[in-house]
Image: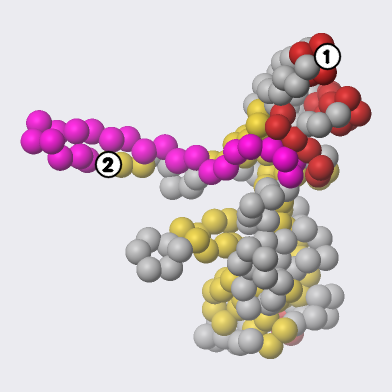
Amino acid sequence: MATFHEILFPLEVALGASGGPERVTEVVTTASGREERNTRLADSRRRWDAGYGVKSFAALAEIVAFFEERRGRLHGFRWRDRLDHSSALHGDAITPLDQRLGTGDGARTIFPLTKAYGALHAPYLRAISKPVAGSVRVAVNGIEQVEGAHFSIDATRGEISFALAAAPAPEAVVSAGFAFDVPVRFDTDFLEVNLSAFAAGDIPRIPVIEIRV
C-alpha cells in the first residue's frame, strides 16, 4: 500500500535539479482564427529532473539507495524547490504577515496554509501541505501568536490549529509565514545508471513529480 514518507530528498541534489510548474491547457483554433482556451486542472503540477543535481558517484549512490527505499514510484517524499520554498518574496525573511489565510468567526480553529501567486488579474491560491517544522509563524490581526500556547501546526497536513481559548475573533485576520517542501514521488520505476557514461559527463535521468496528499 502506498504511503508518504516524511523524509527530505537529498538537498544538495534537489537544489541542482531542473524543472518547475506545469499546467494543462486545451487550445482550440476556430475557423475564424480565434482561439478558445480551457484548463482541465485547477492546480498546477510541478515536476523536476533530479539528474542535473548529481555531481559525484557518492551522490548517485545516495540517490539509488533513496530510490530503493521509496520502492520506485510507490512511496512519496518531501522535495525542496530551490526557487519556491518560502511564503516570503525571494530573498526576504519569513514573517507572520506573509500570507493571509482567512478571517475568524469566534469558533473556527483550523486554518490550512496557503500561498498566493499574483494579485491583480487572476490570483492563484496554492495549498501548502508540507510546511517545514519549526518555521511556521502565525499572526492574528498583525499580532504574532505563540506556538504551543495559542496554536499548534500539523507539519504533515499543513494545518494550523488554534487552542479553543485562542480562536480568532469574528473578522480577525489570520496570517502566517513559513518555509515548505513539496510532496512528490519518483516518476519512474526504472532508474537507469550507466557509470561509464556518468564518468564521461552524461546526466542520469531521475524524474520526480508532485503529488496530492
**Tag 2, which secondary structure?**
strand
Q: Which residues are magenta?
A: 14-36
Answer few, some or many: residues within 10 Å of disc 1's Cα (few below 14, many 20 plus, some between 14 and 19): few
Closer to the camera in the image, 120 or 54: 54
Q: Residue at x 81, y 42 (%)?
A: 12
Q: In the rendered view, would you say 116 is above or below 176?
A: above
Residue at numbered disc 2? 37
Q: Nearer the viewer, residue 70 or 65?
A: 65
Q: Is residue 64 visible?
A: yes
| Figure quadrant of the N terminus | top right
Residue at image location 81% in from the left, 75% down from the top: 147
* Tag in front: 2 or 1: 1
Inspect the magenta stretch and tell me whether residue 33 lies in it. yes
* Residue 2 location (% of width, % of height): 73, 30
Question: Is residue 65 in sight in this rendering?
Answer: no
**Disc on the earlier residue, 2 or 1:** 2
Q: Which percent across, then down, holds residue 92?
A: 67, 70
Residue lying at the far right in this picture: please name it.
58
Which quadrant holds residue 60?
top right
Residue 78 placement: quadrant: top right
- Amino acid on which disc 1 is placed: Leu
Q: Is residue 123 magenta?
A: no
| Residue plotted at (72% across, 19% down) | 202
Which residue lies under the disc numbered 1?
Answer: 195
